[in-house]
């Protein structure tokens, strides 16, 4: 079987997509995860409009990083494919991308507010607020709309790969969250965290927010990320 | 077996009704879906007060479009049957109707507020706010109450079939959402979207709303609907 | 087997108790349903502190209506048993009682606010607001506390059986909802509706409430209750 | 098999950890329960970063109470292990500790507000508000951060074992809830109650709070705790 990507990557992308409804982040067919194979110059993504309960590895679509053309697969890829592609092209460290319409994160996107850092749950994953993009211009909507949806995120982060690693997600204004990570699984887990911290933030805002001290937030981010990280078990994820 | 409607329509209406509780839109037996066969001049609808876990195809009731009489079935049809019938009569493009008491959509109906368009999730399905009807008058409540419940929706849309296609749902004041579509399944999916966007809108309102640009909303509605639609897969729904 | 109550009543009370967690109304072991046999002068109730997943018919406790003593059963009855008993004694039409700590109804009880009538979902079951009791006095707390918890409900309704039928539930201040009905099953379903309308009311209040017209509410209550009711199917419940 | 702790304790700690996701308190791998064997001078705790669906008794880690070293187990213990240890050392009556990031309790922690006593649901378990700690200082974050996270709780309670029994939980500012109890199971159930009362309190605050009378709260705490308790069944838990 002359496959363009490894069985392992296909399986990971399928599994990550199936975790969207299991994590309560899906309505109908909304949401999609992709994973990239940079050596092969392609990424694997969910097909458009397919329900999760019937989704198989065979349905996944392999897309060219270079020009967005379908390299393998009999279905049309997710309409958000070009957004994934523009993120992969701008940020070399990204191995996976997830997009959902999870309700609390969407509420922040619709209110054009970033998700503020209010505690350690947030700081464990995002080293700063989850920012919200500018509104797409009429021109950005008229041509290459989906690619431009990625570009407003790229612009928001000044195409800075380090910032993309430190805050692995953003809210597209009036649309919803896109998250990314070292691989498809991690990008999906960042989508789960993004929704969880949006939910906590919305409830905290109802109670009245207080600024958390930066030294506490730094402590949490560095104990999970970077050279001195000591969270988790090598064999346990 | 001399059935008045096709086995396929019965199966679709049953399945759509069973998706109400699965989608989290049901409390007790509340909610119902119908599907129409315009050639036969009848529609199929859930019986009144039957719980979803015991509902079978045999329980469904076939009702005359012309006069609302029961054509086939040993149970009484949903009390909302006349509301469905008035919508079918007013809007020729409608193939299915769904009514639920989903909690966020009901909250907007009870507050007599339409669900505003705050983002692309809404614009993907509804080309404008989900509007709320006038309150029924004492006369409309006294006689043909359920038929008149449909009429206040028909009046709200000026009996305009195009508007009914562009915004496939409405909130009956102090009651709840009715949605419709090309068939029973689509009407049910519009009920799911209606509740999802009501939930997102309620949370966005808590954060403070900002008007989304019309060019973004238009882009989303037209990529899923009309001659230039490119969302989904023909074989995938 | 010399049982004091019918197998049917036991089975109904067990089933109604098991529906508490299934309907999402339970935290831990909180919540209980009872059903009465007025001829035998006893009622059947959940034992205290038993988890729903291990609850059996054998665990149910049969209690004397006259004096609250245990007539049959090897376990201690629910601590709320005396509250159920005082309601049975005051209102002859009651055949079942349910108590839960469902979160939205408790919020109204803790805020000492009745659940207002904001739409037809409410009016289908409760012919008026779900009222909240006075706070129990130090004396009422000191002696026969659980019996007095029922008494503040009885006082709230002026011991009027008609009112108890028209509005089959009340909130005990700073405690939570008690609902009742013609039998155990109906009392449980009223607890489900009470939580649903509390949830809808809380969300409507966030959007701004508008008074619904009385003629609409009357229409809904009378189409489900009384001599002219036409909701449901005789064989379908 | 030369195990340092009893099979019973291991099984209880495993089961209590597995109840975290079942009770809806978990996102990803967040949350952990431990149980202590004071005679053996050790406690058993969840390993760091392991998902609940694959967690086994073999994965649990046995840690020394005296110095926090791993006595048995091939995985790294939870990063929160030192917080558990500091609580065990300060409060001799504690047999189990639970930490979660349950969303409503975290919202109070992030707003640096204690969970107020608004009704009997709260008073049944917590004899007073669930208090919130001071913010950790830069020094407390820099060295022995996790141990100091326990210390701010110990300081909040003035190292008073009686207070720890009366209010078996606290919120660490900008972090989340820690609860404890006579054993691992009880500490987990206190985490469930903590989240439930936080949820109820948040909704009550939206409606407007009213102070409950102290005599009602006292009645509820004493009917479940202390020499005159009469809630529950000896054999039924």
Image (spheres, coloured by chain):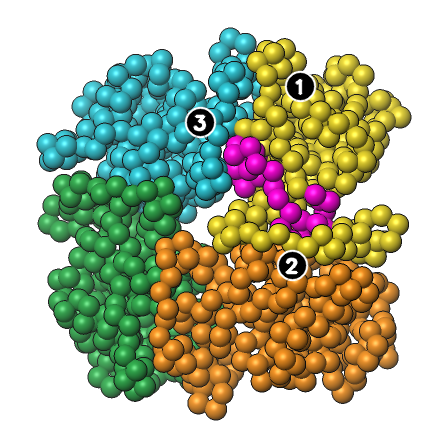
Chain colours: A orange, B yellow, C cyan, D green
Q: Against C187, is D228 above or below?
A: below
Between the C-alphas of marks 2 and 3, the distance is: 35 Å
Residue A122 magenta-highlighted? no
Q: Please rate how many residues cluster around mark 3, counting C-alpha atoms within 10 Å: few if below 14, some from 14 to 19, many from 20.
A: many
Have a look at marks 3 and 1 and say if they share a chain: no
Residue that carries the numbered disc 3 in the rendered image = C117
What chain does mark 3 sit on? C
Q: Nearer the viewer, mark 2 or mark 3?
A: 2
Q: Is residue C17 above or below residue A214?
A: above
Where does the image place residue A140, in percent across and percent down from the top left?
76, 65
For image coordinates 27% across by 82% down, the residue present is D140
Q: Nearer the viewer, residue D204 or C176?
A: D204
The reply to whether dot 2 and dot 3 touch (C-beta < 8 Å) is: no
Q: Which residue is mark 2?
A: A175
Q: Quadrant of residue C131?
A: top left
Neighbour class for label 2 at 10 Å: few (<14), some, many (≥20)? many
Q: Chain of mark 2?
A: A
The residue identified by callout 1 is B148
Q: Residue at x 30, y 82 (%)?
A: D138
Label annotation for residue B62: none
Q: Residue at x 74, y 69 (%)?
A: A148
Question: Is residue C193 visible to the viewer in this orientation of the structure?
Answer: yes
- Give the secondary structure at mark 1: helix
Of residues A227 and D180, the one drawn nearer to the viewer in this rendering = A227
């Amino acid at each position: 079987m002359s496959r363009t990507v490894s069985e392992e990557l296909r399986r990971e992308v399928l599994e990550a997509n199936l975790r969207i409804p299991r994590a309560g982040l899906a309505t109908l067919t909304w949401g999609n995860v992709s994973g990239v194979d940079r050596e092969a110059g392609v990424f694997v993504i969910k097909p458009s409009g397919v329900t999760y309960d019937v989704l198989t590895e065979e349905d996944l679509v392999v897309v060219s990083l270079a020009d967005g053309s379908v390299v393998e697969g009999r279905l049309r890829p997710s309409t958000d494919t070009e957004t994934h592609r523009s993120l992969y092209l701008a940020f070399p460290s990204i191995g996976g991308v997830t997009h959902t319409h999870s309700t609390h994160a969407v509420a922040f996107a619709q209110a054009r507010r970033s998700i503020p850092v209010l505690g350690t749950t947030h700081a464990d994953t995002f080293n700063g607020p989850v920012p919200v993009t500018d509104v797409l211009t009429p021109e950005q909507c008229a041509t290459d709309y989906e690619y431009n949806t990625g570009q407003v995120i790229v612009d928001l982060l000044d195409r800075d790969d380090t910032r993309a690693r430190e805050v692995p997600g953003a809210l597209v204004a009036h649309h919803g969250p896109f998250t990314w990570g070292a691989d498809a699984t991690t990008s999906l887990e960042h989508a789960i965290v993004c929704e969880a911290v949006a939910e906590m933030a919305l409830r905290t805002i109802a109670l009245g927010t207080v600024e958390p001290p930066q030294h506490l937030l730094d402590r949490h981010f560095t104990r999970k990320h970077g050279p001195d990280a000591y969270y988790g078990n090598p064999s346990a994820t």
